[in-house]
Amino acid sequence: VKQAKLAGKPQVYKPDEAVAARRRFSIETELRRALEKDQLKLFYQPLINLKSGEVSGFEALARWTHEDRGEISPTEFIPVAEESGLILQLGRWAMDKASHTLADWDAQVGARLPVYVGVNLSAIQVARDNIADMVGESLRSSGIGGDRLTVELTESSIVQDPARAIRVFEALKALDATVAMDDFGTGYSSLAYLQRLPIDVLKIDRSFVSGMMKDSDSVAIVRAVLSLADALGMSTTAEGIESVELATTLAALGCSSGQGFYFAKPLEASAALDYWKSRRKH
Ligand code: C2E
Ligand code: MG
Ligand code: MG
Ligand code: MG
């Protein structure tokens, strides 16, 4: 079969593929080194309560400025980290860093800041790490309560081994964490899992949100997700709000919270705290 295939289709040298493979390989090597040298940063994007306008939390997002290549997007290095297994180390680092940042903010304002941090967990972590121990350890060492942590999981963490996912999600609930389903609507999971898993928040993917101003289908999908969430007693967060029109439309449709460049881009920890101060009502 292989021979026939080779005979029928001559192997062509594809420079683009070769370049991409080489880049992936060096990204892996350099990411390993960057993690060892603690060169990644964690940025914080505000999540806004669309009713009150106050900051309800921050999503922690990894940032990597490479010495020679400059800024490398997480959309590039997270998949490499997942393929290489480095995501276990990166994920632990992000969880630990985010909870300690929240504890630092508390110390700086001299009070318990009324915000949570959202930490992204990869499907690979769900499959291979002991997430409950890992999260529990960060909560203990930072001293923040589990009720101030939101874990963002994707549908891909469910499909491979649903029974394991249920155990992991329940262990996270036992730590008092809030469980959010990230990029909701873009994966392959069945709606039945919304019933079986302890999910508190649906995060509506940016692709649907940004489509709302252009096509009525996206509006219909967003409305459907909002009413599904409402019926199941879950709250909602819209990603990718880039205009005041989107913010007011989503608020009017009953979406509880949102994030996006209209409010703020992901910020360094100190700028994120300033942003929180600037939006508080009292
Ligand atoms: P995500 O978890 O869905 O995070 C939201 C992404 O949307 C972020 O991209 C954020 O910067 C971007 N975003 C937010 N508002 C807007 C907007 O108004 N317009 C546009 N164009 N984009 C907006 P980012 O930081 O590039 O991260 C991409 C993805 O990489 C994340 O998507 C997440 O899946 C992954 N990621 C980032 N940090 C981590 C991490 O520490 N661990 C894991 N497992 N994944 C991470
Ligand atoms: Mg996320
Ligand atoms: Mg998302
Ligand atoms: Mg996304």
Image (cartoon, grey):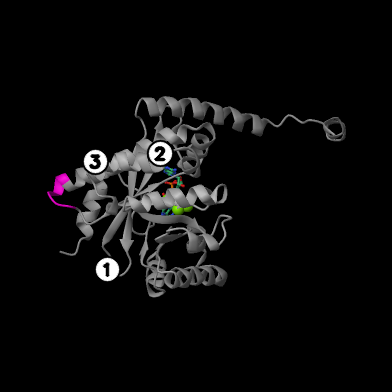
For label 2, the residue is 91
Mark number, residue 52 = 1
Query: Which residue type does callout 1 highlight?
Result: Ser
Q: Residue at (46%, 32%) from the top-left corner?
A: 86
What is the span of residues highlighted in magenta in the rendered image? 107-112
Q: Residue at (67%, 30%) from the top-left corner?
A: 15
Q: Nearer the viewer, residue 149 or 56?
A: 149
Magenta stretch contains residue 140: no
Q: Secondary structure at mark 3?
A: helix
Which is more foreground, mark 3 or mark 1?
A: 3
Which sits earlier in the primary sequence, circle 2 or circle 1? Answer: 1
Judge from the rendering whether residue 97 lies leftward or rightward of residue 254; answer left or right.
left
User: Is the residue marked by circle 3 packed among few (<14), some (14-19), or many (20+) residues within 10 Å?
Assistant: some
- Counting from the top left corner in percent of width and height, residue 93 is at 35, 36
For label 3, the residue is 142
- Counting from the top left corner in percent of width and height, residue 117 is at 31, 50
Q: Distance from label 3 to label 1 (Cα)?
A: 29 Å
Q: Are marks 3 and 1 in contact (CB under 8 Å)?
A: no
Q: Quadrant of the N terminus?
A: top right
Q: Quadrant of the C terminus?
A: bottom left
Q: Quadrant of residue 101?
A: top left
Q: Is residue 89 above or below residue 180?
A: above
Question: Residue furthest toward the left?
Answer: 110
Q: Is residue 70 above or below residue 111?
A: above
User: Is the residue marked by circle 2 packed among few (<14), some (14-19), or many (20+) residues within 10 Å?
Assistant: many
Q: Distance from label 2 to label 1 (Cα)?
A: 32 Å
Q: Distance from label 3 to label 2 (Cα)?
A: 16 Å
